[in-house]
């Protein structure tokens, strides 16, 4: 039996900001600073981590909503970490409070929603577009 997803569950992930994670490299700007899309991916990863142990075989979650601010730039070479806390569970929809930090402090925050889906059904539906 899997644990139930409940408010207060927390996930944390970290990485080091590399050149390939910069706005100039990913196409979201032209500076060699940690890119907002990379921060978003880290936040989503933390959300996935928070509830991974609660999902049944064949289940996953997909991101459906994101409202974030990126408040401080991070240079290449610093560690970046994100944490996500479950704040609400409504059926298959899970809402998270997300925050990201570098070694100097908070760099971003926001709200993220994910929906529990069947991996196989989701892929079949998606690829039926082809």
Image (cartoon, rainbow, N blue to C red):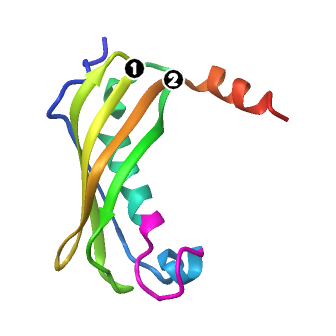
In which quadrant will I find the N terminus?
top left
Left or right: where 32 falls relative to 107: right
Q: Residue at x 59, y 75 (%)?
A: 27
| Quarter holding residue 50 | top left
Q: Quadrant of residue 128?
A: top right
- Total marks drawn? 2
Relative vertical location of residue 121 with respect to residue 39 in this rendering, above or below: above
Above or below for 49 versus 32: above
Between residues 6 and 71, which one lies in front from this camera angle? 71
Residue shown at 58% from the left, 80% from the top = 25
**Disc 2 on helix, strand or loop?**
strand
Residue reaching furthest to the top: 1
Q: Residues within 10 Å of mark 1 (few under 14, many from 20)?
A: few
- Specify the principal SS of the magenta part: loop
Q: Position of residue 91 (x, y in %)?
A: 35, 15
The reply to whether callout 2 and callout 1 are in contact (CB within 8 Å) is yes
Magenta part of the chain: 27-38
Structural crowding at the residue carrying mark 2, measured as other residues with C-alpha within 10 Å and reported as few (<14), some (14–19) or many (≥20)? some
30 in the magenta segment: yes
Residue 92: which disc?
1
Name the quarter where the C terminus is drawn. Answer: top right
Q: Is residue 11 magenta?
A: no
Q: Which structural element holds mark 1?
A: loop
- Whole-number angstrom distance, CA of label 2 to CA of label 1: 8 Å
Residue behind mark 2: 117
């Amino acid at each position: 039996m899997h644990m139930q997803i409940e408010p207060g569950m927390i996930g944390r992930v970290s990485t080091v900001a590399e050149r390939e994670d910069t706005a100039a490299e990913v196409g979201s700007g032209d500076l060699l600073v940690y890119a907002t899309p990379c921060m978003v991916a880290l936040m989503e990863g933390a959300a996935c981590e928070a509830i991974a142990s609660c999902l049944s075989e064949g289940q996953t979650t997909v991101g459906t909503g994101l409202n974030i601010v990126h408040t401080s730039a991070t240079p290449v070479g610093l560690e970046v970490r994100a944490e996500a806390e479950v704040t609400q569970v409504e059926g298959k929809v899970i809402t998270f409070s997300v925050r990201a930090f570098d070694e100097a402090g908070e760099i971003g925050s926001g709200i993220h929603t994910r929906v529990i889906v069947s991996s196989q059904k989701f892929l079949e539906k998606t690829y039926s577009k082809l």
